[in-house]
Amino acid sequence: MRYPFLDLAKTQAGYVDELKASANAVIESGRFLHGPETERLEHEIATLCQVRNCVSVSNGLDALRLILRAYIELGHLEPGDKVIVPANTYIASVLAITDNGLVPVLCDVDPNTLNLDASLIDNMMDSHVKAVMPVHLYGTPCCDQLLLDMIAKYKLLMIEDNAQAVGAKAACNGLNGTRMTGGLGHAAGISFYPTKNLGALGDGGAVTTNDDKLAQTVRALANYGSERRYHNIYCGLNCRLDEIQAAMLRVKLRHFEQENAVRREVAATYANSITHPLVVTPTIFNSMQQVWHQYVIRVTDGKRDAFRTYLQEQGVGTDIHYATPPHLQPCYRNLTHAPLPLTEQLASEIVSLPIAAPITPASAREIADIINHFGR
């Protein structure tokens, strides 16, 4: 494969010695949980997202689960309450809701951003809707004035699914006066899954928030429900991040902005170079800063499978994010929802192109040339 979709070994080849040195330092310290690397990482992530609190946890799904559970413990939510969530998302967004006995209200998406369409919220409201979970899908922030107006109008909690957009900036300030994802709403869940722009060498996640009480509750819930040793105030979970992963993430943070900048160059190159009439490239918004966790095109006219086969034969790897939306998964076959025509159309058209290092603008031009010759 000349251009594999993702090669994690190559994405970190430039700083592998730093990773090894940091891992060795943790091993030699004898401190593997609740140590200085985790504390420093939390400070650095909070600074990046421009919030007061960051609580590191085991993965992105647990981050969202813990936020919702904490709001239940604090009395802001109760089982049976509804949470508006985009239908075009990874299933983890919905799993976090149903795992807490809450009800997902699936919302169709905006055709330009592929994110939650805030103009549909009015028609989804009833007395049981208490929160909205915008997902910053593929690295494009989901926050505009209309969404903020809906949140204010209905007094909703805003819980960001920031699994794919750490370091991105929205087009407007969120609830806290910052444009940074992770700081736009009342709380946010982050994933450090290895494929993310900021990925661990295993699993990991974090919760970011300006709500000190929420952060304290999440931290206790993630540590067996304990606020101090052998004193369990909640029936909690074990969702901690370990020191090795914190150390790995701190190394990657030093290279994070540079790698995001390259992704933006690659995305711009694709946008300027792909001219095939059956291929719709994603919108680049000058009003915001996208981080391009994925570069997702649409292949129309029912040609997606042939397109992917052609690229495979030409040595270009692709993927689909996501081929089956949550409401069509077997586990949610009984989930009631409004019609979701755009989400279902997208699931039949979308293709993710390579964008992570070692893909460069030059590579993107060559891939675009291959794409432009599809079917010719």
Image: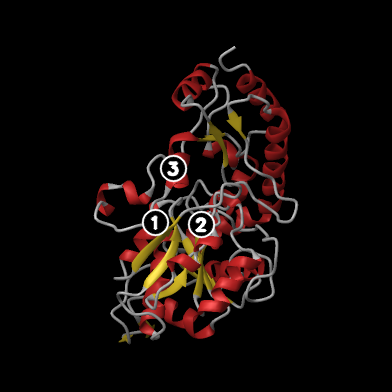
Residue placed at 67% from the left, 61% from the top? Answer: 170
Residue in the foreground of this view, choosing between 46 and 120: 120
Residue 265 placement: quadrant: top right
Three-letter residue code for mark 2: Ala
Image height of 270 relative to 101, above or below: above
Disc 1 crowd rating (10 Å Cα; few below 14, some 14-19, many 20+) is: some
Q: 74 left or right of 140?
A: left
Cβ atoms at labels 2 and 1 below 8 Å apart: yes
**Disc number placed over residue 163 in the picture, else none:** 2
Three-letter residue code for mark 3: Tyr
Residue placed at 47% from the left, 61% from the top? Answer: 205
Does any portion of residue 197 appear in the rendered image? no
State the image coordinates of residue 258 (x, y, percent, origin top left).
71, 48
**Disc number placed over residue 92 in the picture, else none:** 1
**N-terminal label among 2 and 1:** 1
State the image coordinates of residue 311 (x, y, percent, origin top left).
53, 21
Image height of 300 relative to 289, above or below: above
Three-letter residue code for mark 1: Ala
Q: 181 left or right of 74?
A: right
**N-terminal label among 2 and 3:** 2
Given the current orientation, which residue lies at the most extreme front position?
123
Reading the image, the residue beneath label 3 is 322
